[in-house]
Amino acid sequence: MRNVWTVAKREFAHYFVSPVAYAVAVLFLSIVGLIFVVSVSQLSQGGEPSMNFVFGPLTSLFLFFAPVITMRLLAEEQSKGTLELLLTAPLKEWELVLGKWLGAWFFGLSLVGVTIIYAAILYGYGNPDPGPIYSSYLGMALMVGAVLAVGVFASSLTGNLIVAVAIGYTFMLTIWIIGFASNLLQGFFGVGNPNIVDFANYIDFSNHYSNSFGRGIIDTVDIVYFVSVIVISLFLATRVVEMRRWR
């Protein structure tokens, strides 16, 4: 595991010297901060303090920003010709992929971690239920890991950063469309074909987050789903890297 942590620390540190990463962080935190300010202003009118108004948009934001965060992880190594050099070292393919993902995940968790400030501010306005807040952070950590794992897989498929972003957005848009389509399927086929609706809802990232973690419920089904997405995505990325190694 030493190789994995070495790669992870290298990638995590790279985000703090990357202009793109800083741009993503500023834009991401600005949007979340604006949402928080608007929501807190409504609390003065008698609303109930809650972090749901912050966690809800976070799911959509990470679907949007994940391809940008992960685009360079493997695609840049391929474009610069350093992937083969890395793999000639005593470094296995799965160690490289896992280390890259961990570095991106730590960066994603850092962005989510900033929102703890908002939770602290809420306690100044009232006494929000801590249960949903804890479960929401757990669910958000798992969802961020799953989304970024899909981004790592997209990055492994090409050596062009723009193409990596495009592939990543294709995956993320598909996930979003499935979630949107499940609502339409409920209206058209909900009674006659419940299996179709159940399958569409199961694929959707946001359903697994909002239907349990966002309500203060920790369901092993949702944990298994996110972990499965991470494992499958990283496995596929590893297979792609292995094929490129032997070309």
Image (cartoon, grey):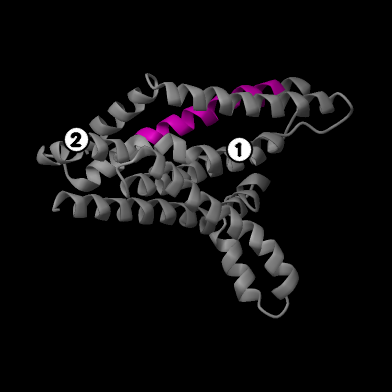
The kind of residue tagged 2 is Thr
The magenta segment: 103-121
Q: Which residue is pictured at 64% across the width and 29% down the height? A: 32
Magenta segment main secondary structure: helix
Which of the marked residues, 2 or 1, is nearer the chain's N terminus?
1
Which of 14 and 207 lies nearest the eye of the viewer?
A: 14
Residue 58's tag is 1
Q: Which residue is mark 2?
A: 82
Label count reads 2
Is residue 112 rendered magenta in the image? yes
Inspect this view and state whether residue 66 appears. Answer: yes
Q: Who is closer to the viewer here, 43 or 197?
A: 197
Identify the image quadrant of residue 31: top right
Q: Nearer the viewer, residue 49 or 96?
A: 96
The image quadrant of residue 125 is: top right
Dot 1 amino acid type: Leu
Identify the residue shown where x is 49% and y is 41%: 144
- Crowd class of label 1 (few under 14; some 14 to 19; many from 20; radius 10 Å): some
Residue 151 versus residue 45 in the image, above or below: below
**Where is 92 relative to 16, above or below?**
below
Q: Is residue 219 visible?
A: no
Residue in the foreground of this view, choosing between 77 and 196: 77
Residue under the image location 59 percent in, 53 percent down: 176
